[in-house]
Amino acid sequence: MLRPAARTPSGAPERPQQAASEAQCTAVVAALRQALARPLEAGLHIVATPIGRLADITLEAIATLARADRIYCEDTRVSRVLLDHFGIDRPLSSYHEHNAERVRPEIITALENGRGIALISDAGTPLVSDPGYKLVAAALAAGARVYAEPGPSALLAALVASGLPTDTFLFAGFLPGKAGARSTRLAALAGVPATLIFYEAPGRVAETLAALAEGLGDREAAVARELTKRHEEIRRGRLGALAQAFADERVRGEIAIVVAPPGAEAVAEVDDEAIRSALQEELGKQKLSAAARIVADRLGVQRARVYDIGLAMKDQGRDEA
């Protein structure tokens, strides 16, 4: 038996999507209230914050920041925008590479006095390419508890969207700016049997891509820019071709570069025509996503490459129709 449609205050039937949305909001509010009701444990809380979309923050992160005795961040101006958005009014201080030696004892003293201290970065998970690891080491040495509040991470977002192997990977941070030191670093990384992930400043992307091609070989790679933000872009291709493409552009935003492991370049030996032929056979049996997975496994090529070729085949079929 069908139940009568629910009515809004105006008397109009309530849409199923509207009812579901209101139920979800109620559940979120209830979960957040439950988290806020718990006292914050004394210790250092490492809290991940959004790398773009503010909605990516977790409920636990909001609750932790709202209950912290003090929050330490890289740039108070940047973090204040986040805190204001969620109505969080807690004492906020800076902790970054230029003042870390001076501020770290202050934080340790607060921890020794039983305070709940939160550490955040401008975006993403703290301790990744920032001085937070020294603070964690000092906190543990002082006998304080350290808690991780997981959440957004640019390096993981770039990795999973790259289409490159994810079973073994190494985050290599920023490469040295000087050519000699950069070459030495790349020589040490060249034989690492893992997908490599780098961060880079927008003004150095083309130069770094060219250096990667020279130091690691012309491997498959992906350049992820402005992840989760309005102008998100992920470009895939070989390092040399990507270096040429970015050389003619004025690059903006946050950049992550993902490079295939050594030996993965062999996948390029399978040409597009062989992939089209295999896909044509499988597409008669199942959907593109499943067909792409089967063909990628059979030919030993990247699934993202097979899927892109399949999409092009479908578009061509529609045009011919």
Image: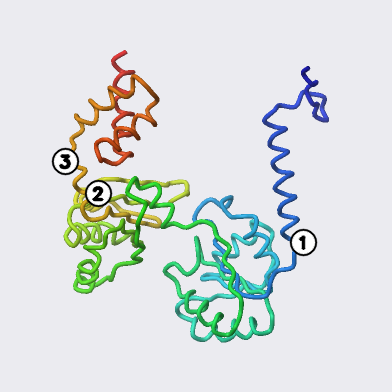
Mark 2 neighbour class, 10 Å CA radius: few under 14, some 14 to 19, many 20 or more: many
Residue kind at label 3, given as amino acid type: Glu
Q: Position of residue 271 (x, y in %)?
A: 18, 35
Residue 212's spot in the image, x, y percent? 22, 60
Q: State the CA–CA distance, disc 2 to disc 3.
A: 12 Å
Disc 3 is placed on an element classified as helix
Residue 261: name its quadrant.
bottom left
Q: Element type at marker 1?
A: helix
Marks 1 and 3: which is nearer the front? 3
Total number of numbered discs in the rendering: 3
Amino acid carrying mark 2 in the image: Glu
Q: Is residue 84 above or below residue 184?
A: above
Instruction: Return the residue at label 2.
Output: 220
Bin the neighbour count of mark 1 within 10 Å (Cα to Cα): few under 14, some 14-19, many 20 and up: few
Badge 1 is on which residue? Answer: 37
Q: Quadrant of the C terminus?
A: top left
Residue 6 against residue 203 in the figure, above or below: above
Q: Secondary structure beneath disc 2?
A: strand
How far apart are the alpha carbons under marks 2 and 1?
49 Å
Alpha carbon distance from label 1 to label 3: 59 Å
Q: Which residue is mark 3?
A: 269
For the point 23% across and 25% down, the residue is 277
Between label 2 and label 3, give the one nearer the viewer: 3
Query: Looking at the image, which residue is at 34% across and 45% down?
Result: 163
Please report whichever mark, 2 or 1, sits nearer to the chain's N-terminal start: 1
